[in-house]
Amino acid sequence: MKQNLILIFIILFATVAFFINRSRLNTTHSDLHYIDHKKEQLHQNSKEKIEDIHSVKYLESYIEDVINNGSSQKLGFAYGDMQAGFADKDAAKKIAAYVVTLSGKQPTHPEWVKEGHTFYISNCGGCHGEDGKGIHGTFPDLTRETLLGIERR
């Protein structure tokens, strides 16, 4: 009797599991359309994020972030990672506006470039050079089309 109850329980469990899995596999045409739509949205969002990474606004925010918070990306330069706090937050925005111009881009706040240049020379130029090309192997080149830290991302 006990064995019959166990056998009935196993059969019942297997039947319920079968129907649950079967209902998951029965996707309708509208389900497939929804899935395709979601895939297309994800693809579009990925393309937009890649475009964002190459925007001036992203570049400026990346430079500000490195100035304000330092960089621990292990980029392989002899000097090592950049420490935070070489300039205050206000100066960091202006330095970022200037650094963007080193690679021929137009900053989002061109009115900050002149003051940013002054901050750059006094805070960054000693390591990255007045021209922003860095000291080969010791400090990164800030004139690259895509900065090395962003490229690694």
Image (tube, rainbow, N blue to C red):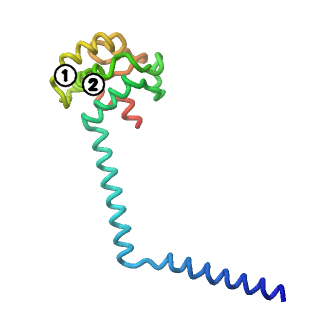
Label 1 packing within 10 angstroms: few (<14), some (14-19), many (20+): some
112 relative position to 134: left or right: left
**Residue at disc 2, secondary structure:** helix
| Quadrant where the C terminus is found in the figure | top left
Query: Looking at the image, is 64 positioned above or below residue 50?
Result: above
Residue shown at 48% from the left, 19% from the top: 80
Q: Give the mark nearer the N terminus: 1 vs 2.
A: 2
In the rendering, at what x and y percent does residue 134 appear? 35, 17
Amino acid type indicated by mark 2: Lys
Question: Mark 1–mark 2 contact, CB under 8 Å?
Answer: yes
Amino acid type indicated by mark 1: Trp
**Exactly how many numbered labels are in the figure?**
2
Q: Which mark is residue 93?
A: 2
**Residue at disc 1, secondary structure:** helix
129 relative position to 83: left or right: left
62 relative position to 19: left or right: left
Residue shown at 30% from the left, 55% from the top: 44
| Res 106 → quadrant | top left
In the rendering, at what x and y percent does residue 71 appear? 43, 26
| Quadrant where the N terminus is found in the figure | bottom right
Q: What residue is pinned by disc 1? A: 112
| Res 145 → quadrant | top left
Calculate the distance from the C-alpha at mark 1 to the C-alpha at mark 2.
Answer: 8 Å
| Res 105 → quadrant | top left
Query: Looking at the image, is 151 positioned above or below residue 129?
Result: below
